[in-house]
Image (tube, rainbow, N blue to C red):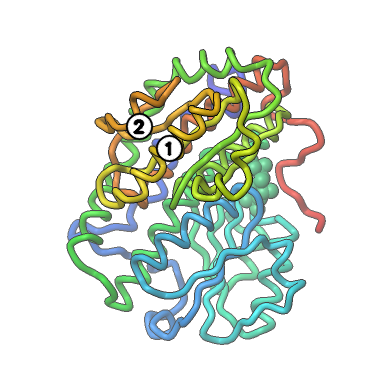
Amino acid sequence: EKGGYDYFMLKEIAEQPKAVADTLLGRIDAAGSLTLDEVRISAAELREVDKVVIVACGTAFHAGLIAKYAIEHWTRIPCEVELASEFRYRDPILGPRSLVIAISQSGETMDTLMALRHAREQGSKVLAICNTNGSTIPRESDAVLYTHAGPEVAVASTKAFLTQLVACYLVALYLGQVRGTKWGDEISAVVRDLSHISGEVERVLETMEPVRALARSLADKKTVLFLGRHVGYPVALEGALKLKELAYMHAEGFAAGELKHGPIALIEEDLPVVVVVPSPRGRSVIHDKIVSNIQEIRARGARTIVIAEEGDEAVVPYADHLIRIPATPTLLQPLVATVPLQVFACELATARGNEVDQPRNLAKSVTVE
Ligand code: M6R
């Protein structure tokens, strides 16, 4: 059932192009409009939404953090993202015009379920983004947009994450469409790019051998840091989470701009630091800033592992290891930038002799609070 792979995780990483394509299937028509009929919250209600609140845990929370950038940029609706386990304990401000999005692969995560129950008690509408048909979270929500990743067996979430991102982009674009905000050339271009993105994920998968070799060479390290900016920041958090749960290594993700506010003190000779570099096109200011961050940490002895777009030459002098990803619109970059981090963590776990599909102390779905 592992389809010739040693681990479910490897199989599931390889299935990502299909999972992404399946999640898009039938949801964008030939004219580039979104048809999310299954989201049974009326267009009139969606036009009234004055705030989006995303609740989720773990990897699904990282998808939510990325969704915030897309939702606010494409719809101009304020969006908060909160760990489900924190949400209801702080008396969040919610009302009938708040749209709460609960993201969960399993649909059974107790923290997320309790958060959505709390939101519904406050009169908010809840939209679930879920991978498991008929599970509790979609059953208790007002509407559901299913991800079509297929069953995810490995405890570490991979293909479900990419499809959660796709679903979040679809919701953001759909909200933009029904509200008529910013529905212009940029959005049409994104819709077009989204329909090609599974091929780009495939291309990333074809170039992963050097990432595996790099991971094996780092098997004796104690710590790996991850840096990112803009949507690259949640990608860095996700890279660190994968490494913690699979390789049992100390791993931390930081917003690159925060370095100088503390974490740069951690940099020492030969410390591996993975940096997710945003596209040099579009938000070029952020790109230039992260290039100086790479310079700063390298000057202090860090071993820099740089994930950057093809054609981004500015990073070359400062990258001890360079991992190339295809050029994509900035907001979609997490779909390609996360893949090398999954492969990296999986290979490191194998090199350290860990159980890849069943890491110690973890369960696939956490059904207690
Ligand atoms: O099933 P869910 O998406 O609600 O699960 C949430 C987290 O427990 C899950 O993403 C966890 O962090 C994964 N093991 C990460 O790889």
In the rendered view, tell whether residue 65 sits above or below residue 91. above
Circle 1: residue type? Ala
Residue found at x 41% / y 49%: 23
**Residue 306 percent location from the top left of the image:** 43, 29
Mark 2 in CB contact with mark 1 (< 8 angstroms):
yes
Check the image and report above or below for 34 versus 52: above
Q: Which mark is residue 337?
A: 1
Residue 176 left/right relative to 253: left
From the Cβ of disc 2, is ligand 1 less than 8 Å away? no
Quarter residue 94 falls in: bottom right
**Residue at the spot of label 2:** 325
Crowd tier of the residue under label 1, counting other residues whose Cα lies within 10 Å: few below 14, some 14–19, many 20 or above: many
Residue at 22%, 60% (x, y): give it.
186
Q: Is residue 3 left or right of residue 361?
A: left
Q: Quadrant of residue 210?
A: top left
Observer-nearest residue: 242 or 2? 242
Residue 235 locus on image (x, y percent):
50, 44
Where residue 52 appears, x then y in whole percent? 51, 73
Residue 117 position, x and y percent, is 70, 73
Report, in whole angstroms, how far the alpha carbon at label 2 lies from the one at label 1: 7 Å
